[in-house]
Each structure stands twice: as C-alpha cells, then as structure tokens.
Image: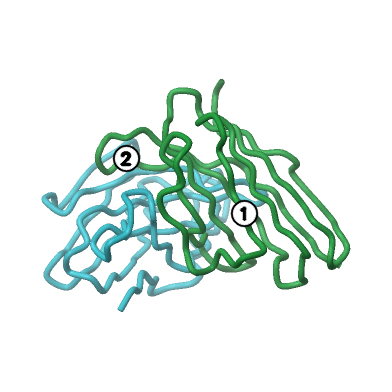
Chain colours: A cyan, B green
Amino acid sequence: GENVGLHLPTLSVQEGDNSIINCAYSNSASDYFIWYKQESGKGPQFIIDIRSNMDKRQGQRVTVLLNKTVKHLSLQIAATQPGDSAVYFCAENRSAYGGSQGNLIFGKGTKLSVKP
Amino acid sequence: DTGVSQDPRHKITKRGQNVTFRCDPISEHNRLYWYRQTLGQGPEFLTYFQNEAQLEKSRLLSDRFSAERPKGSFSTLEIQRTEQGDSAMYLCASSTSRDRTALAFGSGTRLTVV
C-alpha cells in the first residue's frame, strides 16, 4: 500500500540542540524522497531531497539519511534555531506506483517546536 | 519572478457557489501541479500539467473540479457547486522536466465554504 508516515507527530527541542525527524515508507521500489518545511500560512518549502541510490545527503545544517533495508528516512537538523519551528513533511515520489514524477505522497507531518 | 504565485490568498464562499483560483508558476517551469491540503494533513495530489496538457488526475478530482492551463503558463482551478467538504488549502506547485526535480510550492489559496 501507499504509506508515508511519521513516527512522532510533535517534537520539542532546545535551541542549539540537534533535531531528528523520522519517516517510514512502504514501497521498496520508491526511488526519490523529499523533505519539506511548512510554516503557518505558507506553502511547503523544499529542504533537501535524496535518491534511492544514496544513503546520505547533506545540506546546510540538514542531513537526510535513507535506510532502504528498513524503508526509513530521517531528517537531521543541526544546531536547531527558533526559525526552524515549523511542520516538516517527508514526501515520496509516486512514480513507483505508476504516477508522474511530481505526484508526491506526503506524510501527515511532524511539528517541530524550538524552545529558546 | 521569484516563485509560484497564487491568487487569491483567501476565499470565503457560500455553499453551491462556483470559485476559481489562479496559479502563476515559475516562468521557466513547464510542469504545474495542484494539491489540496486539509488542516493537520499533508498535501494531496490533484492534477498535473506538462505545458498545456493535463497528463494526470487524481480520483480526488471530482466532476465538480476542472483545471486548465490554456497557454502552458498560468493555470486555473475551478470548483463548481462548492460543498463544505471542499474547504481546504489549494496549493499550486511547479517544476522543470528534469528527472526527479523537487516541486516549488506557492503559498496556496485557503478556501472556506460556509
């Protein structure tokens, strides 16, 4: 079945700490994953993506890890800042299910709250 | 042109009325998508255009919904005979044709049907 979900619906961290947001997917044939950040009243904003031929990808303060064995994806945010407070979604490309490249399956999201 | 633009930002309408939303994608993007997002949920795919051709439609897109992209640039999404269940954020996104390209989303149109 199609399922991109999240282990924790809410996450509260202290400013300066590292944050880890987790996501599970169900289709082992899925080949492209994206993390989006959504602030209140705004559309999702691209953070980082990863293809299935990679295990890890790093951006500015963010790292995405992909474990294909257990079909698990995580987003690590280093030195979390108040501006990182938002809802974070992982998304799976639906092309593995026969959809188009931009037909994404989103999870429900994790709300990250950063305490100053 | 710095991003995907959507208009209006908010729309309140009475049940049974028709509404139309507009999306202007990033100018060099030939792919355009419509998604719907309800409170507390992730966005759900509705439909996809490559240039002016509508290539994919979700089963969520009932007969009351119609989307167009007549010249391969801006797109409109019309909902006829609105129902309270149509209340949601309607998001537009665009991308290039390059393989596995992340979508750029607009800020959305929030529809409230009363």
Q: Position of residue A63 (x, y in %)?
A: 28, 47
Report the mark closest to the observer, 2 or 1.
1
Q: Is label 2 on the same chain as label 1? A: yes
The secondary element bearing badge 1 is classed as: strand
Q: Amino acid at mark 2?
A: Thr
In depth, the one of B65 and A17 nearer the eye is B65
Q: Residue at x 16, y 54 (%)?
A: A52
Q: Is residue A98 left or right of residue A108?
A: left
Q: Secondary structure at mark 2?
A: loop
The quadrant of the rendering that contains the N terminus of chain A is: bottom left
Residue ID for mark 2? B101
Q: Eyeballing the image, is B81 above or below A65? A: below
Q: Residue shown at 43%/23% (left/top)?
A: B28
Q: Are marks 2 and 1 in contact (CB under 8 Å)?
A: no
Q: Chain of mark 1?
A: B
Relative to A64, is A82 on the left or the right? right
Residue holding disc 1: B66
Q: Position of residue B77 (x, y in %)?
A: 64, 48
Disc 1 residue type? Ser
Instruction: Report x, y in % for residue B43.
Output: 52, 60
* Chain containing mark 2: B
Examine the rendered structure and indicate whether residue B37 appears above or below residue B20.
below
Observer-nearest residue: A91 or A81? A91
Label 2 vs label 1: CA separation?
A: 25 Å
